[in-house]
Amino acid sequence: MTDKKKGQAMANVSVIGAGSWGTALALLLCKNGHDVTVWSYKEEEVRTLSEKREHVSKLPGVKIPNEIFFTADLKEAVEGKDVVVLAVPSIHVRNTAKKMNAYVKGGQILVDVAKGIEEDTLMTLSQQIEEEIPQADVAVLSGPSHAEEVGRGLPTTVCIGAHTETTAKYLQQLFMNEVFRVYISPDILGIELGGSLKNVIALAAGVADGMGYGDNTKAALITRGIAEISRLGVKMGGAAETFGGLAGIGDLIVTCASVHSRNRKAGYLMGQGRTMQEAMDEVKMVVEGVYSAKAAAKLGKKYQVSLPIIEEVNKVLFEDKSPKEAVNELMLRVGKAEHMALPWEE
Ligand SMILES: NC(=O)C1=CN([C@@H]2O[C@H](COP(=O)(O)OP(=O)(O)OC[C@H]3O[C@@H](n4cnc5c(N)ncnc54)[C@H](OP(=O)(O)O)[C@@H]3O)[C@@H](O)[C@H]2O)C=CC1
Ligand SMILES: O=C(CO)COP(=O)(O)O
């Protein structure tokens, strides 16, 4: 922190990953008066973004201010920064963190904003970053926040999870402004589980839309989807309140409903008959639910939690099951009580 502008503490911040979310957050942080560097793994992209000052393929129509500096040099992006934001797709987080390690000093704050679970280890992204960069102070930012809307300055709320209240409050004031409201929480695990599992449910919501199903179906998937996410998340140690909050139901609603959602769009295309690969190619940006689906099902087995929607999504994605069959399977499961907590008065 070096200077003051508009009453906020100025910071040197880097965003690792120049996709739609990395770019939108860089714009937000720059608007907040911070010194912002964006790292891309492609020299070519650094040149284009520096010259064009617009991310034409991923955030079209949004001007990137001249103050934002682009680089493909990871050392330059990480060393000496007050805060480093990781915004690469989940499957590249571990490897990117590994490469960053040499440049991260003890206690340096890293904020993961990607959403996913590693298939082999079943680790969340912050757990992977902590394994690769043990000296870092790792936090997470999640919640209903599509880049397309944050980039245009539309009112958005998110939740930041951190290990200490000091880091949480520091990051809150770093990101927060009149169109970006930040809540804080100590429940890093719950926030990460909410953010990654909702993508799997959003694929199902997209499939339902693609098949021409209606609002009833969507509401059912959201409601029973959050039941699955909370059941698993609480069993794993997340707080029930988190799943009823921005990083839980909030993010699930926006991802299942939004025209901007990559996961919903991929599901929609599959509901219309495309294969998983065709749908992913057409969406062009990362479809995280596809990468988290197997991990989610494995977690269900490990923690002995029933996850019927997540299991059917896996069958549609990886076992060629038709979406229609998957819906039938879900609808015709043996009749259940909605929740087991309320006993009959007899
Ligand atoms: N977009 C959104 O609205 C939001 C996204 N997120 C999360 O943020 C993360 C990033 O998503 P998003 O920005 O949408 O994704 P994008 O696909 O738009 O961008 C990801 C960026 O990472 C780059 N990348 C690909 N491979 C590597 C690699 N090996 N090393 C480093 N960088 C690489 C991509 O490059 P290339 O173009 O070559 O693939 C691209 O620039 C995801 O986990 C997503 O769930 C969270 C909240 C909102
Ligand atoms: O996490 C997101 C919004 O909060 C982004 O979801 P999609 O990747 O489906 O667009």
Image (cartoon, rainbow, N blue to C red):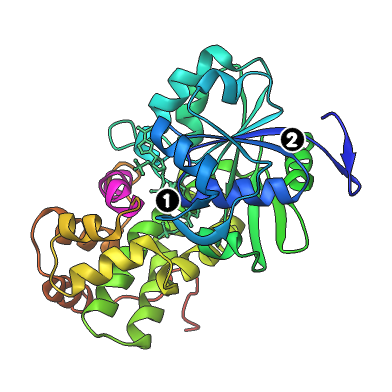
- Residue 202: in sight, yes or no? yes
Mark before the other along the chain sequence, 1 or 2: 2
**Which residue has dot 1 on it?**
196
The residue at the point 21 percent across, 80 percent down is 211
Q: Is residue 336 above or below residue 201?
A: below
- Residue 237: in sight, yes or no? no
Q: 9 or 172: which is nearer to us?
A: 9
Q: Position of residue 150 (x, y in %)?
A: 60, 61
Secondary structure beneath disc 2? helix
The residue at the point 19 percent across, 75 percent down is 327
Q: Quadrant of the N terminus?
A: top right
Q: Position of residue 310 (x, y in %)?
A: 28, 59
Q: Amino acid at mark 2?
A: Thr
Q: Position of residue 235 (x, y in %)?
A: 45, 48
Question: How many discs mark residues in the rendered view?
Answer: 2
**Which residue has dot 2 on it?**
167
Most prominent secondary structure in the magenta stretch?
helix
Horizontally, residue 17 falls left or right of residue 305, namely: right
Query: Which quadrant of the figure shows ligand 1?
Result: top left
Residue located farthest toward the front when viewing the structure as drawn: 51
Q: Is residue 97 above or below residue 39?
A: above
* Image quadrant where residue 314 sits: bottom left
Secondary structure beneath disc 1? helix
The stretch drawn in magenta includes residue 92: no
* Image quadrant where residue 26 sits: top right
The residue at the point 88 percent across, 33 percent down is 3
Q: Amino acid at mark 1?
A: Ser
Give the extent of the magenta segment. Answer: 287-300
The residue at the point 54 percent across, 48 percent down is 23
Horizontally, residue 33 falls left or right of residue 254, namely: right
Q: 272 or 130: which is nearer to us?
A: 272
